[in-house]
Each structure stands twice: as structure tokens, then as C-alpha cells.
Image: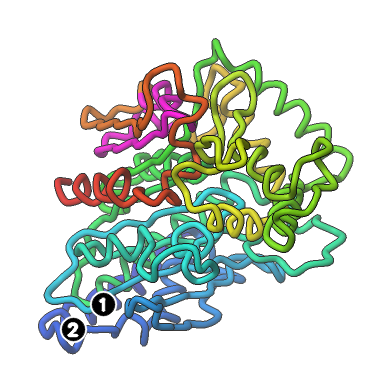
Amino acid sequence: MTTQRNRKTRLAGLTSLTAVAILLAAGEAAAQHYGDRLARHLARAACHSVDRFQDCGLISVEQDTLEDGSRRTQYLVQVGAGEFDTITIHRVSVERRGRLRRALMLLPGTGLDVENLYLPRINSEAVPDDYSPLIYAAQRGIDAWSMDYRGSDLPAGIEDYGFMADWGLATATTDAQLAMKFARLVRLFEGDGYRRIHVGGYSAGVSVAFSVASRDAARHQGRRDVRGIVVVDDAFDTDPATSQGACMALEMANADLAMGNFIEDLSFLNLIGGFAKADPYGPTPFGPPGFTNLQFFNLVVTSPSGPEPFHIFGGAPGEDGFPAPAFTPQNLAIDQGILFEPALPLVFSRDLSAIRCSAEPVSELDGGLPGVRVPVLHVGAAGGNANAIDYTLSQIGSTDITTMLVRKLSPGEEAFDYGHGDVFAATDAAAEVWQPIVDWIKRH
């Protein structure tokens, strides 16, 4: 009875908001930025849309003008009872004329918050003022949104990470659904209409994007949010014939969780990045004798890991003969390492490993893939995850699938080619990755 009453309340609230939006849409100038003024109410409506009726709502709205002149709006949203149960929804906009008919919610990977990955100029002087896939998309008529996951920018000195104990894939998926609903409502009240929007994901964000689409496909057609899917250099489900590594990772994650360890500790990347920036030519305390801090950092981020040629940045010998990033500015690579989130929710990785280890669907997050029939674009990096997405794409119901691989070197040289991090950090990423995404969205 309570659930039915909540759903009726949600429907009534959304109906009232829609009626006001229709009146506002008659005057486009009047609707400009009206969504921000109603953000608190729209956030509550978005909370209700994912059946969150308590401890969910807008905390604050902040706006700032970026160095290139574009505007960023940040919506801080409470999504649970805990101190760190918050997400930040970002929107980048430029001066526009007319309605924005297309929109993208571009989800980052875990460990890479929106500023570090999609707005790097905020924290790094290594790139131009407008170096950003969000700014790039906004300048080309696409409403550009993104979202920081829970745990982004945690304070230093935390000793008990028990608050992450249930921050799994389902949590991130529901948070992303809420963010998409909120974005659609803001767009409605600014005269852009209530159209479905594209969901995108990079790295682990690919799994979140497909999980969102999987859930979305199971909803009534009138309640769906996803117009299309843009995924960049990662997989979701994997071929059971090659799942041994995922099964081993699942076993290890379960053992760690059973011992009360709730995080993946990646602080080493912060540490070596800090040494490389503060004292690049000093001897490293970590690597082989004779290596400098900069050389050791570059060795870590350009070297392939595991049996595949996967690496973060494609590398080539520098003036000293040691490998250095070949496609991404050196200082940007260092800054991203320093700003990488040091503590990631272990249960999120456990959930991904469980899906990849099992030959059968684990939950509605991967079980709904056959019902996903919206258009899909995948962009892979030859030296990153390349075509690892192929099995996932074979599981969905869509017949409109576009794949492209960014390759700069000849076949057989993948160990030095465009890497996982280059797709959003390389000097030519706008031409190689961002523009194809913009073109595809405009066609869909």
C-alpha cells in the first residue's frame, strides 16, 4: 500500500511539474535557467523516479565560469543517509540559440572524477582552456552532462571505509538513473523538451552505462530515459571462455570483503605522480637503481599490464631513451595520476567480476541486455581495451551498432599504441574520439 501511494504521489508531482513546463516552453527566453531555480523540486522528483523517498534531495547548486568562457553548473545531491552518500551532477553549457535537442550524460570511470577526466584544465595547466570533451560537445550543440560517483574527493585520513560496504554496481546504476532523470527534468523546464538522452561511459563507466540501459529496457516505454549508448574503451560482460581472470578477481574480492576490507587502494599512483612532479630528476625510492622519479612514473603508466597489451598511455622512447607518453602531454599524465581517487569501492569491482565470471545473468543489470535495442557507439583504443566490448555487443538486442578503433601504429605494435587514458587525454583526442562521438549523436 505504501509503495502504491508513493508511486501515485510521484506521478502526481511529475504531472504538475510537466504542466508548468509546458507553459514555460511557450516562451523560450523565460525558460532559460528556470530549471536551476526549480532544481530542488526537480531533484525530489528524480529521487522519486528511482523509488528513493527518504534521505534524497538537492543539497546545493553552484555555478562558475570556466576559463574558456563556458559555464559549469554543479548540483550536489544527497542520495542516502550517510555523510558521503552524495553525488555531484555536472552540466557544461555555452551561449546558445534555440533548443538543445540532443543531450549526453557522460559517466566517468571509477577513480576519475569529472574534473580530472572531462574538465582537466581546472586542475592542470598542461592543456588549453577549452580542452574538455564536455566543452567540446556543448560548443557543438549537445547538452553536456556528467556525474561524480559517491566517494569522489573524499577527505584524507579516513580509517574506516565501512560506509562503502554497499557501494556496488547497483548503487552506481541507480545514482546514474537519478542523474539522467534530473537532467531530463531540467531540460524540460528550460524549453528543451523531455526527450530521452544518450548515456555514455568510459572505462568502468561502460559497465554503469550498460547497466542503466539494461534496467531501462525493462521499464514501460513511457518511462525510459535512454536514447542511445556511447561507450569508450571497456567491456561489460565477457565471454565465459575467457573469464578465468574475472573468477580469480571475484574470489580475491570476496575474501577481502569477508575480512572487512572495503576498498581498492590505488594511492600508489598518487604517490609516484607526486614524486614525478615535485622532483622529476631525483632518484626514485620505488624502482630499480638509476631510475628517476619521472622515469619510474612513465614506466608504470606506459608499460603493458597482464598478457594483453593494455596500458594507460601509449609510450615511446624520450630523449633519455626511457619511455614517455607519446600521445598525451607529460604534465597532464602526471596531474591525472596525482588526482586519481586513492580509495575505490571494492564491492563495485566484486560485482563486475561476478558478472564477468558467470556464464548466466547475475541480476537485472546484465540480465536485461537482450532487451537493449537502442543505438550503440563503441570507441576503443588499440593499446587499451581495444575490441574487448565485442562479447557484450553480441548479447544486446540492438541492430544499430557502430564500432571504431583508434589505432595510430601498425598491427603488432599495440603495446605502444593509443592507450586507455589517451582517449580523453591525448593532444589529438578531439579529432580521434570526441568529434566522432558528436557526429554519431547528431545522427541518432
Q: Position of residue 245 (x, y in %)?
A: 65, 20
Taking the image as shown, residue 329 lies to the left or right of residue 248, namely: left
Decide which of tag 2 and tag 1 comes sooner along the chain.
2
What residue span does the magenta drawing correspond to?
368-393
Q: Secondary structure at mark 1?
A: helix
Q: Is residue 325 above or below residue 153?
A: above
* Residue found at x 78% / y 33%: 254
Which residue is label 2 attached to? 24
Q: Is residue 88 above or below residue 370?
A: below
- State the residue at coordinates (81%, 35%): 288
Instruction: Give the mark count.
Output: 2
Q: Are marks 2 and 1 in contact (CB under 8 Å)?
A: yes
Residue 189, which numbered label? Answer: 1
Task: Identify whether 275 is placed above or below 239.
Answer: below
In the figure, is residue 262 to the left or right of 231?
A: right
Residue farthest along the front direction in this orientation: 319
Judged from the image, the secondary structure of the residue bearing numbered disc 2 is helix
How far separated are the C-alphas under marks 2 and 1? 7 Å
**Amino acid type indicated by mark 1:** Phe
